[in-house]
Image: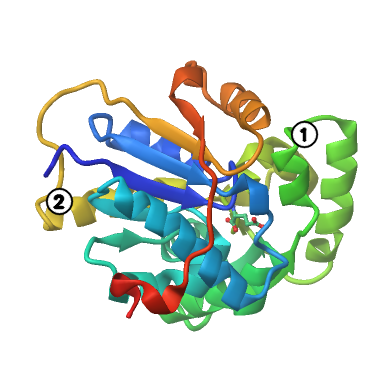
Amino acid sequence: MLERAIGVIDSGVGGITVVLELMRQLPHEQLIYLGDTKRCPYGPRKETQVIQFTWEMVNFLLQKNIKALVVACNTATAFALPQLQKKLPIPVVGVVQPGARAAIKSTKNNQVGVIGTEGTIRSQAYVQALKKINAQIDIQSLACPEFVPMIEKGHIAGEKIENIVETSLKPLKTSIQMDTLILGCTHYPLIKRTIQKVMGHDVTLVSSSEETARETSTILDVHHLLYEGIRTPQHTFYTTGDLKQFENILTTIFEQEYVEQIHRYDIHKIDLTKQSHHI
Ligand code: DGL
């Protein structure tokens, strides 16, 4: 039971930024990751489609007998988290609330920026999460639709990236005097250095990874699901898209080689009305 893996999902490689933190905070837990790179980005898609795709990913991981699920995608969290938490028999952790908490901890002037996909920004999930903690907070939100496709192609540094980031973030520099910027998409920490350079060093960048891993650890503990022994876990990574491209990006992110543990999974449509855990 406790040996079972924690499932982690994202639309692509972004969730790996959460995986890195899970590995650091929970070094003996085994992880199974699924990135739906074939259908990435989720950001511009309709809510109903994001929900459908998310359930299809979850369905695969349930077959792997996971003991908990981390939705390491802000867009999927924004649209599907409440129903996943309600309908799944295992604990489910999202990334929006942990990200909001990290921002509240960081801000000194209560002026916070949020960048994310079009879906995440449109859902107002961060605005609601932040306001719930502190109603006085000033928030400026901005969708950056160009970032995810660029990162998925493995472009994470260089002059061209800097120009795109600079142009995309321009609207943030004109209104509130934010001291904290939430990277409200799990892909964005992969271009953190460039975002920091563009925003300047007076702005603290926060991502949900650390808080999400902390919340996962607490929830596993509360449910008596933590692996208590010592082991070197064998993590497994699945992509629904191009294996070589996924391997290349993972090799860039991890210092360690995981090539033997990376596989392709052909995602298939499910009829949500026929899912027992979905009814
Ligand atoms: N990493 C996903 C997120 O956090 C990216 C969404 C997308 O595919 O556009 O929102």
Image position, residue 204 (x, y; %): 60, 49
Residue on which disc 2 sits? 221
Residue on which disc 1 sits? 155
Q: Amino acid at mark 1?
A: His
* Residue 144 sits above or below residue 206 on the image: below
- Of 255 and 193, which appears nearest the observer? 255
Verify CB contact (< 8 Å) between mark 1 and mark 2: no
Left or right: 223, with 23 as reference point:
left
Left or right: 212, with 242 as reference point:
left
* Residue 75 sits above or below residue 188 on the image: below
CA gap between label 1 and label 2 equals: 38 Å
Among the 4 quarters of the image, the one containing residue 201: top right
Quadrant of the picture in which ligand 1 is shown: bottom right
* Residue 279 sits above or below residue 35 on the image: below
* Total numbered circles: 2
**Element class at badge 1:** loop
* Quarter that holds the N terminus: top left
N-terminal label among 1 and 2: 1
